């Protein structure tokens, strides 16, 4: 089983739309974890796309937020009331948060990252929240020093593989932290960002397109995370 996810991370509309267009081109499903209101996401094709939430609790750690955990959750759920899943920004997590997710009637949590590991399985927690691990992320791929010629995962095997991309890295075709560090001062200026797009070596965009082509050409069925969660609850994992 293959699933694609994207952490939106406050990307501007043009950057989000660029990512959506790629998934639509190849007719591949994706779960977006959203940080903010996006008209592009709101209007997106729900046959292909699921919208989850991507709350940021880091201001609480820094002591510069007057909001509580629950306030932050409520704010993003007000924007995306249909959301059934959550992955927090920077994978911030705790037992208290897991219970709050269940209290808010969320179906699943996707915070558990296991880079390049095989044998992934979702599990049902004590509060009936489903925890879905994932095993690939674009910025971690370059943190390991890996190139983007391949993802170092065998997507042809009968394994659960869950990818996590970021629209900003797809847009920039990021291949290392140095390009992103240079470009991010123009994060809200899509035209300026294009000046920093990598065209020299394989990058995040190239890898994603190759994966999407492979899925389409081989007629792989892709999945939204909520569907994986429902299968777990039906004991199909």
Image (cartoon, helix red, strand yellow):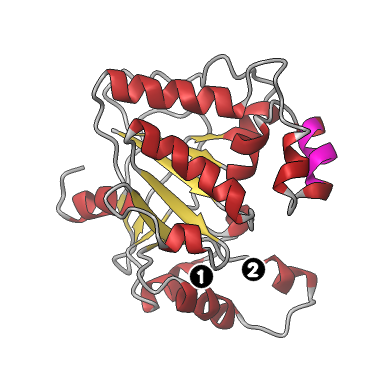
Left of 84 or right of it: where is 147?
right
Under circle 1, the secondary element is helix
Report the number of numbered marks.
Answer: 2
Q: Which residues are magenta?
A: 179-184
- 60 above or below 204? below
Quarter the C terminus occupies: top left
* Contact, mark 1 vs mark 2 (Cβ under 8 Å): yes
The residue beneath circle 2 is: 57
User: What is the x, y in percent for residue 119?
Assistant: 35, 31
Give the residue number, with chain letter if any, for mark 1: 97
Instruction: Residue at 24%, 32% (x, y): give it.
Output: 221
Residue 44 visible in this rendered orientation of the protein: yes
| Viewer-closest of 136 and 183 | 183
Q: Residues within 10 Å of mark 1 (few under 14, many from 20)?
A: some
- Considering the numbered disc 2 on the image, is that residue within a helix, a strand or a loop? loop
Query: Which image quadrant is residue 10 in?
Result: bottom right
- Labels 1 and 2: the sequence-earlier one: 2
Q: Is residue 55 above or below residue 218?
A: below
Residue 20 in percent (x, y) is at: 46, 44
Q: Which mark is residue 197?
A: none
Which label lies toward us, 1 or 2? Answer: 2
231 in relation to 118, above or below: below
Image side of residue 201 versus residue 110, left or right: right
In x, y percent, where is residue 207? 53, 23
Quadrant in which residue 44 is drawn: bottom left
Above/below status of 2 relative to 11: above
- Majority secondary structure of the magenta segment? helix
Tell me the residue at 73%/70% (across/down). 59
Q: From where the camera sits, is residue 134 visible?
A: no
x, y percent for residue 186:
80, 48
Distance of mark 1 from mark 2, alpha carbons?
10 Å
């Amino acid at each position: 089983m293959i699933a694609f996810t994207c952490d939106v991370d406050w990307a501007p509309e043009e950057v989000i739309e660029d990512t959506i267009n790629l998934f639509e081109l190849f007719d591949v499903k994706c779960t977006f974890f959203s940080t903010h209101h996006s008209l592009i996401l709101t209007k997106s094709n729900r046959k292909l796309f699921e919208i989850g939430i991507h709350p940021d609790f880091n201001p609480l750690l820094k002591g510069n937020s007057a909001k509580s955990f629950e306030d932050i959750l409520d704010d993003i759920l007000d924007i995306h009331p249909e959301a059934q899943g959550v992955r927090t920004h920077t994978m911030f997590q705790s037992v208290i948060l897991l219970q709050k997710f269940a209290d808010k009637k969320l179906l699943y949590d996707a915070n558990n990252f296991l880079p390049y590991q095989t044998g992934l399985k979702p599990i049902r927690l004590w509060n009936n929240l489903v925890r879905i691990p994932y095993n690939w992320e674009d910025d971690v791929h370059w943190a390991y020093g890996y190139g983007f010629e391949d993802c170092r995962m065998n997507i042809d095997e009968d394994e659960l593989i869950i990818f996590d991309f970021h629209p900003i890295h797809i847009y920039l075709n990021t291949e290392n932290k140095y390009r992103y560090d240079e470009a991010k001062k123009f994060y809200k200026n899509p035209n300026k960002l294009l000046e920093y797009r990598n065209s020299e070596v394989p990058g995040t965009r190239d890898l994603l397109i190759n994966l999407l082509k492979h899925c389409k050409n081989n007629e792989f069925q892709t999945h939204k995370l909520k569907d994986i969660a429902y299968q777990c609850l039906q004991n199909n994992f």
